[in-house]
């Protein structure tokens, strides 16, 4: 009886080890696919964007902050006005900015509005330049370049909400 328990224990331990190896192999395969996808997305972002935009925004920060603005998206030969509002965590100051954006992975105009997240760092005193990258749940990516005026220190997470104006 004891030998049967030892054999059964050895078999179960072997099966557990086999499952663990398969699990790690699947994790490694999934990681390789994710890495390949990230590299392909980076390469695509070095090419021409799917859309461009211009925007004006104001932002006030005191640890937590808010932003609001408006802009125009240029997509497939049409102009789409939009508004943007957002919240930030981290930073202090007030800035007004005018900027441009490149929009990547936008296939349908319905994928543009929504909530975007980004992480940024920067400082502004007087006239400044800045940039940020945001992504929404539909994997649309917006990279911004802006010129602003004001005094601010930014180090934190931003979340913006974009709505098309009808």
Image: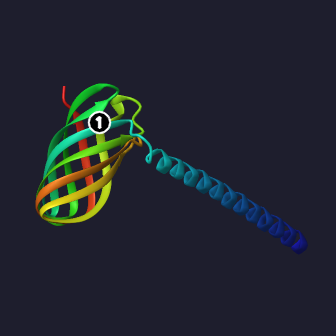
Indicate the quadrant where residue 65 lies: bottom left
Residue drawn where x is 87% and y is 69% of the image = 7
For the point 64% across and 59% down, the residue is 28
Location of the C terminus by quadrant is: top left
Q: Would you place residue 107 above or below residue 49 in this image? A: above
Q: Position of residue 19 (x, y in %)?
A: 72, 59
- Of residue 38 and residue 4, the one placed in the foreground of this image is 38
Q: Position of residue 116 (x, y in %)?
A: 31, 47
* Res. 155 image quadrant: bottom left
The residue located at (22%, 62%) in the rendering is: 89
Q: Nearer the viewer, residue 88 or 93?
A: 93
Decide if residue 138 is in sight here.
yes
Residue 155 shows in the view: no
Q: Is residue 82 left or right of residue 143?
A: left
Q: Residue 160, image x and y in percent?
A: 25, 48
Eyeballing the image, is 59 above or below 92? above
* Residue position for label 1: 113
Left or right of residue 116: residue 64: left
Color scheme of the displayed model: rainbow
Give the quarter of the figure containing the N terminus.
Answer: bottom right
Q: Report whether 107 appears left or right of 80.
A: right
Looking at the rendering, which quadrant does residue 25 occupy?
bottom right
């Amino acid at each position: 009886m004891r030998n049967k328990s030892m054999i059964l224990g050895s078999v179960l331990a072997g099966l557990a080890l086999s499952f663990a190896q398969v699990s790690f192999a699947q994790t490694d395969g999934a990681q390789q696919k994710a890495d390949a996808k990230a590299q392909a997305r980076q390469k695509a972002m070095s090419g021409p964007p799917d859309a461009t935009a211009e925007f004006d925004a104001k932002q006030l920060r005191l640890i937590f902050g808010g932003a609001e603005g408006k802009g125009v998206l240029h997509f497939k030969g049409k102009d789409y006005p939009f508004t943007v509002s957002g919240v930030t965590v981290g930073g202090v100051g007030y800035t007004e900015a005018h900027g441009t954006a490149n929009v990547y992975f936008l296939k349908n105009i319905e994928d543009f509005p929504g909530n975007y997240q980004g992480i940024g760092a920067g400082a502004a005193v007087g006239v400044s330049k800045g940039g940020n990258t945001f992504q929404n749940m539909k994997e649309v990516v917006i990279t911004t370049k802006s010129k602003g005026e004001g005094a601010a220190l930014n180090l934190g997470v931003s979340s913006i909400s974009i709505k098309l104006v009808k």
